[in-house]
Amino acid sequence: MGAMVAPFPSGPWFDELVARATADTAALERLGIAEFRFGMEVLLPDGTGQLFGLVLDGYDISAEGPVTEAAFGPDVVFSGPLDAWTEMVGWIEANGPADSAHSLNGLSIAGIPFEVRSSDAMGSDKFYRFMGTLQAVFDAAAAAVPVPARAG
Amino acid sequence: MSLGLDLSYLERSARGEFDLGWLRDTDTEWGVRAVPSKTGLTMRDISIGSYGVIPEHAPLRTMAPRGSDVALDVPDMGYTVNDKCEVWSDNVLDLYEEAVSRQWSATRDIPWGDLAPLDPDVEHAMCQLATVLSEVEMVAADFPAKWLWRINHDFVEAKMFLCTQVMDEARHTEVFRKRALANGGGLGKATAVIERFLQLILDAESYDEGSALMHLLGEGIVLSLFRAGAALAPSPVEQQIFRLCMQDEARHVAYGTMHLRYRLEQDPSMAADFHDYLDKGEEMIAMIFSTPEIVEPTAILAAGSVEAACELGAAAGDVLRLQIVGDYLKRCDHAGLDRRGRLHLPDAIIEGVPGAKSAVAV
């Protein structure tokens, strides 16, 4: 797989990411079903933010955005500054599937640089329940390394 | 005991004189045609018509499938959990499907070949953590197994979910035992404090009590440990182990949280009982937080070495501590049980957790 073409952050970038992640349907099905609305908020230097949505629906995955939080209705919002996003995405593009330090989990466990925001405990617990699928989607940004067959 | 063998039926049926009562006279809802949804024919898809009605109190204590035409002479199986509110949660059908769909293999799905030699102290820390987790995970199989045969078959969806939990926990016990033995280390120490907490769960006098202690409190803590383990993993092997276990554990916690919520919605007066259960559990958890065999390996993995962990002191485990207590309070809130202000945890453990202050002195 080559490098991502669309600029980050943008709706086309997330569409391209999902297209790459869903190219191998057998691998995706091995990860199992999920029901989750994942909000991804990019905080821009000017103090504004852009929200994108990832919808896990059974075995289907789709991207939406930019969206508003009210319209999208996320279970969880994964929020962080632009430079943290570009560092994470850039590392995966260059090196392959995220290591611990560049994973969605590793970058949010301390609340910095990413915060996991949910209105109730069931939302954040869904973030844990579907972590493997979410990470597999982001790992699809890797330029040369295929998504692992069992990304978990 | 007579099993009621009807010798005359053997003779009649041999002559082709069939009874056909099951064909002509069965009193069930006939003509049902469940429609598969996009992932296949799910438990929710077949929860239709009278078959989707779960009684608040099971009228019989038999293994007969709910909705079947039950013969009058079926034996009493002696179930002791016969009220829906004792085991139900509104998400249990979906959690069952999710569990079945997201199973994995500790043999096949972990990249064992990628294990690399670690600094001996870090390897020792990982092995000690693996020892603790291999020890505690099996209680989360033992507890459901202890209660499964007491739960009325009318609540079969809840029983099926608990069966998935038994399998999940077997796999967790397996994967941590394998990790301890796979990279030049071995098993570490098993401690009395941990065993006492496991005993508290196993000896629970009711399913409610055990579920609160295990699904909500104990597994909530282990979920945070898994999350920390994935974040601190020294190689893709540990990252994958902890990530996959985290997914499973979060399902169990989601069941426990929503079971407690359902229980309290049906009978708000139960809140006092649950507070009592959790008072006891939290006191035990406070002891676990002061158990070197858990605290120190986690701190060493977080800091990267014994020396760095010693320099950081309590700060090395702060992220884990804050997450454990914070997530636990959020789950209690969601279930409708406000534990803020009555946590049975020392100040040193709740320090920095929003709203957790003014706890009961321990």
Image (spheres, rainbow, N blue to C red):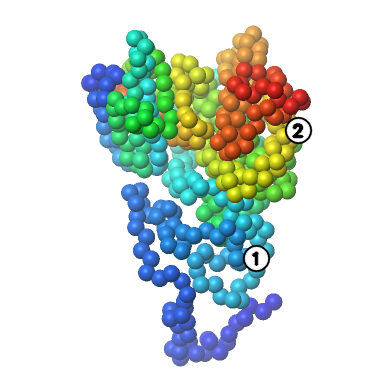
Crowdedness near tag 1: few (<14), some (14–19) or many (≥20) residues, C-alpha within 10 Å = some
Amino acid, disc 1: Met
Q: What residue type is labelled 2?
A: Ala
Residue B20: percent from the left, percent from the top?
Answer: 45, 82
- Write down the quadrant of residue B338 in the picture: top right
Q: Which residue does the numbered mark 2 point to in the structure image? A: B192
Q: In this view of the protein, which residue sits in the foreground, A26 or A75? A: A75
Question: In the rendered structure, which disc, 1 or 2, sits on the residue that comes first in sequence?
Answer: 1
Residue for point 45% across, 15% down: A113
Q: Quadrant of residue B354?
A: top right
Residue B223 can be seen in this image:
yes
Name the residue carrying label 1.
B77
- The residue lying furthest to the left in this view is A5
Q: Element at badge 1?
A: loop
* Label 1 to label 2: alpha-carbon separation: 37 Å
Could you tell me which residue is drawn at 27 percent across and 35 percent down? Answer: A23
Q: Is mark 2 on a helix, strand or loop?
A: helix
**Would you say A105 lies left or right of B130 here?**
left
User: Is A126 in front, or is B111?
Assistant: A126
Q: How many labels does the image show?
A: 2
Closer to the camera in the image, B257 or B284 = B257
Q: Mark 1 lies on which chain?
A: B
Question: Same subunit under labels 1 and 2?
Answer: yes
State whether residue B112 appears in this view.
no
Give the quadrant of the C terminus of chain B.
Answer: top right
**Residue sitting at x 33%, y 20%:** A50
Query: Where is B25 relative to B233, above or below?
Result: below
How far across and how far down the image is residue B290, in percent?
A: 72, 23
Give residue B28's position: percent from left, percent from top.
46, 71
Write down the chain letter for disc 2: B
**Where is residue B32, by image quadrant?**
bottom left
